[in-house]
Image (cartoon, rainbow, N blue to C red):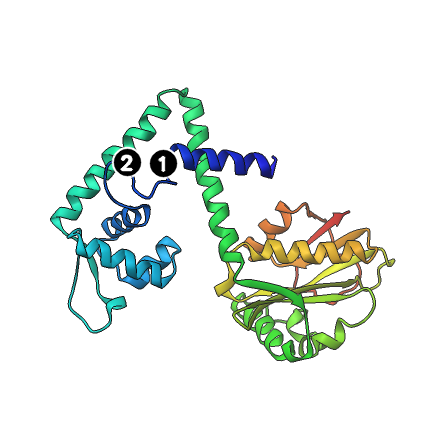
Amino acid sequence: MSIAAIRAASRQMVRELGMLDSRIGCLDMSGAQAHALMEIEASGSLTSGELSQRLNLDPSTISRTVARVIERGWVTADEGDDRRSKPLMLSPAGRDKLEQLHRFADGQVSEALALLTPSDQQLVVQGLETYSRALSLARRQREFTIRPIEARDDAAVARIIRTVLVAFGVTGPGSALYDPEVDSMTAAYSEPGSEYFVLERGGKVVGGAGYGPLANGDGTVAEVRKMYFLPEVRGFGMGRRMLARVLDGARGAGYREMYLETVARMTAARSLYESMGFRQLDSAQGCTGHTACEIWYGLTF
């Protein structure tokens, strides 16, 4: 799908919905005001700070929007010293205004859907939901940075590795928990044919992954190593981005195949590997020493 085509369709949709106008139809309200009323209605009450997060608007814009809807009598705010923490609720006038908005917007959508077959209507719903989720995820991923490991990261990476392995109960003999490299990752991955990357968010290392030559391999196979993330990272799609970075690095280093080991209970990780083309193997490869792992995967470039 062409990026230009998606952008063109998005522009046309925005124009047809009248979103470039300073006011929505004949309702005498801005888009930000309309969205504020809808979010407050959906939650019952919201603070300005919560509204800022919901609408992805900066605090100064939200402050002006909230002041305007209060001034117009559509929203009420409890008394308090900090305006940002005051619960905002719809007034009766606000509910009436929102009902007018819903009738107007429902009419726009109904008129367009009436021109489509039921199957095309479902395609529209699925497409919009999928694309909006992807846009949201892409925005949230911008909070993260993937970069090569540095010596200052070693302690944080070691803590992450141990935290995750303990959480999944992978602590017995043959676990990566006891690998000598865990406490000196920068040095371990400074060798040719090896790289390790850390995932950083707000200056804090929250995950990592790397690759290196498969022990006792023929030199053409790289192993995905030490791919672990703190729980706060999960759900952002960063595992996919990190694994893609590792695969790109290994491919660029001249490897022709990838190998990895895991445990059955790491179901989310296994789903990720399989979605990126890894196939499950019948037996372990090389000599990693990780006898606690009972699931093996391979990928050919």
Percent x, y of residue 173: 66, 72
Percent x, y of residue 33: 28, 49
For marks 1 and 2 on the same chain, the one whose residue lies earlier in the sequence: 1
Q: Is 234 situated left or right of 216 in this image?
A: left
Residue in the foreground of this view, choosing between 223 and 199: 199
Relative height, residue 100 to residue 294 (above, below): above
- The amino acid marked with disc number 1 is Gly
Relative height, residue 271 to residue 165 (above, below): above
Q: Which residue is denoted by mark 1 in the rendering?
A: 18
- Contact between labelled residues 2 and 1, with CB atoms less than 8 Å apart: yes
Q: Quadrant of residue 223?
A: bottom right
Residue in the foreground of this view, choosing between 17 and 281: 17
Is residue 235 among what the camera can see?
no
- The amino acid marked with disc number 2 is Gly
User: Which mark, by number, is residue 99?
Assistant: none
Relative height, residue 89 to residue 148 (above, below): above
Residue extending farthest left: 92
Quarter of the image for the N terminus: give it.
top right
Spatial CA span between label 1 and label 2: 7 Å
Relative height, residue 66 to residue 187 (above, below): above
Is residue 88 among what the camera can see?
yes
Q: Which residue is denoted by mark 2 in the rendering?
A: 25
Residue in the foreground of this view, choosing between 3 and 180: 3
Q: Is 152 situated left or right of 115 in this image?
A: right
**Residue appearing at x 54%, y 65% in the figure:** 168
